[in-house]
Image: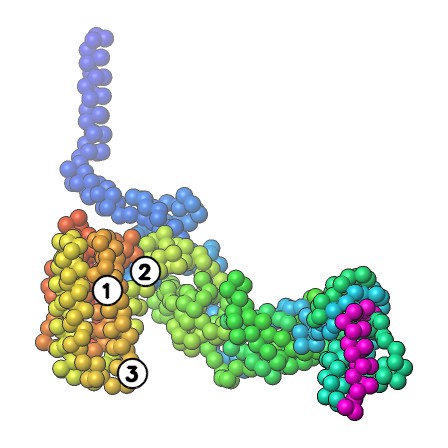
Amino acid sequence: MKTKQLITYTFIALIIGLGFGWLIFGNSPKDSSTHKNSLESKKEEIWTCSMHPQIRQPEPGDCPICGMDLIPLEANSNSNPLVFEMTEEAIKIANIQTTIVGLGNSNSKEIKLSGKIKADETNSASIVSHISGRIEKLFISYTGERVNKGQKIASIYSPKLITAQKELLEAYKVKDINPKLYEATASKLKFWKLSEEQIQAIISSEKIIESFNIYASYSGVVLNKKVSVGDYLKEGEILFDIQNLNQLWAVFDVYETELSNIKKGTEISFSTPAIPGKTFTSTINFVDPIINPTTRTASIRTSITNQSNLLKPEMFLEGKINANNNSSESLLVPKSSVLWTGEKSVVYVKLPESKIPSFEFREVLIGESVGENYLVKKGISNGEQVVTNGAFVIDASAQLNNQSSMMNRNLVSNNIILNDLPDYTNSTSSQFKTQLNKMTDAYILLKDVLIEGNTTKASEKASSLINTLTKVDMKLLKGEAHIYWMEKLNEIKISSNQIVKSKEIKEQREVFSKLSESIISTLKTFGVEKNTFYVQYCPMAENDKGAYWLSKESTIKNPYFGEEMLTCGTVKEKIDNNYRNNHSPMSGHNH
């Protein structure tokens, strides 16, 4: 009975288990396939962080660095290396702020300077002995003592002077017979600074002056006391250095970037901490023509009257100049938006009407400082938005994402070298273009031997290239086109000569990149005649800085690596009869 019941319970359990199994796995073939495809789809999708693009994960989640939500990689992908995209959330976290660039009044700006009081070198003098002898007395005893013009400062015993006085008395006795002898002896005494009154006193008294007094010929203070009582002086030897402090110089250092705002006659006001509440005003009367190579400054100075003796040499000064610029309105950009300040600086410009907030890496030409702004000479237009807070965050993120940044400038610099060019294609004659074609053919032959890695042949082909330059008639060009060709001609000659002289293939290839840029710029500027050239680019050349070259074929044959990486590169542009400088670049990269 129990056995029968056990079989019955087992059968019922089996039926129930099969029912649950059917419910769960009844449609397993279809569900399994769908689930598998879903997993594969998720596996193919990569998630990244908009602030830290180096993060790559196969599924959504939080960034392990900043905790932000990861986004699909496609949402942050961008083919333009100059543009970096960020999510709204990333912008808030990084506190990215922008300012609209506009025209501002740059007519006047204040330049702050630091300087010192210096002695006026034109008011310094040395008191010397006009005769040789021994110092009997000194009436000036220490450095810093004030001396007035005509003041007696020393007494000298001079054997020569005694002898000369005796000669004077003897000559005076025969003056009527030999007047020239008398004149000669009197002149000798006058040369030693004896006055006519002293000479007549000697004759009248018939007494010899044994000690000769020396008088100050200038007023001032003693800077250097160079003698003591008992010293024997030679004729012309210095006793004291005197400096007049009634007129002083105020000398200031000006950075070379500010020199364009300063010239002779510019008014300057200054003060010194030693005299609180006192402001002095004068005009600049000297601008040093030489820049200090260490501090990159030049000295300017002004003269200041010091009758009250308030100012003293070596006092520190704080100066101000209100400089006027020529233009009343100029394009200004906030200083906080500029990275790597210099002639070629970097800003990030927010692109308008983009679905995803995008910021473009932009190289700009910066001018003078105007308060909290810089003058912008080139690179930004009126009304554009520049990042004023968080620019460094964007730059760092772009660098991690292998996009253009301060540390990865070659992505943009090469583009500027080859595209920011004048266009003389329409005004250049067919004859000149044909001559350029022959020059380029010689360049192509040089490129081919560099692919082979043949140093000797490279020198020979570079020499041949130089010969073709002599056949390019520069008289066919006029005006600015002529000047531009002269610049490129010089560049091509210098690079070609370096290749001729070089004995190392690595060095020849390095110089070849500069030569290529000059050749490409020349063809783009003047145009070609019945020929087609391909501008090709290898991002790994020049130690990953990237380098261009020209080829007559679209097939990549890399002259910078040769057989090592023969096909590494991409075709960037095609230069033919129809080429103009606004031609859009081609894409594609082989490796």
**Residue at point 81%, 68% (across, down):** 157
**Residue at point 21%, 17% (across, down):** 10
Give the main secondary structure of the magenta stretch: helix
Q: Quadrant of the N terminus?
A: top left
Residue 293 shows in the view: yes
Q: Quadrant of residue 173?
A: bottom right
Q: Earlier in the sequence, mark 3 or mark 1?
A: 3
Report whether 108 appears left or right of 553.
Answer: right
Residue toward you, 585 or 307: 307
User: SS class of the residue under badge 2?
Assistant: helix
Q: How is the image coloured?
A: rainbow
Q: Nearer the viewer, mark 1 or mark 2?
A: 1
User: SS class of the residue under badge 1?
Assistant: helix
Check if residue 164 falls in the magenta segment: yes
- What segment carries the magenta color? 153-177
Q: Which residue is mark 2?
A: 410
Amino acid type for the residue under numbered disc 3:
Glu
User: SS class of the residue under badge 3?
Assistant: helix
Up the image or down, 68 lies above or below 270; here it is above
Return the mark for residue 497: 1
Residue 89 shows in the view: no
Q: Which residue is mark 3?
A: 480
**Residue at point 21%, 84% (across, down):** 475
Q: Earlier in the sequence, mark 3 or mark 2?
A: 2
**Residue at point 45%, 66% (across, down):** 342
What is the spatial separation of the Cα atoms under label 1 and label 2, in whole angstroms?
26 Å
Q: Position of residue 80 (x, y in %)?
A: 29, 62
Amino acid type for the residue under numbered disc 1:
Asn
Q: Position of residue 384 (x, y in %)?
A: 41, 73
What is the spatial separation of the Cα atoms under label 3 and label 1, in whole angstroms?
26 Å
Disc 3 packing (10 Å; few <14; some 14–19; many ≥20): few
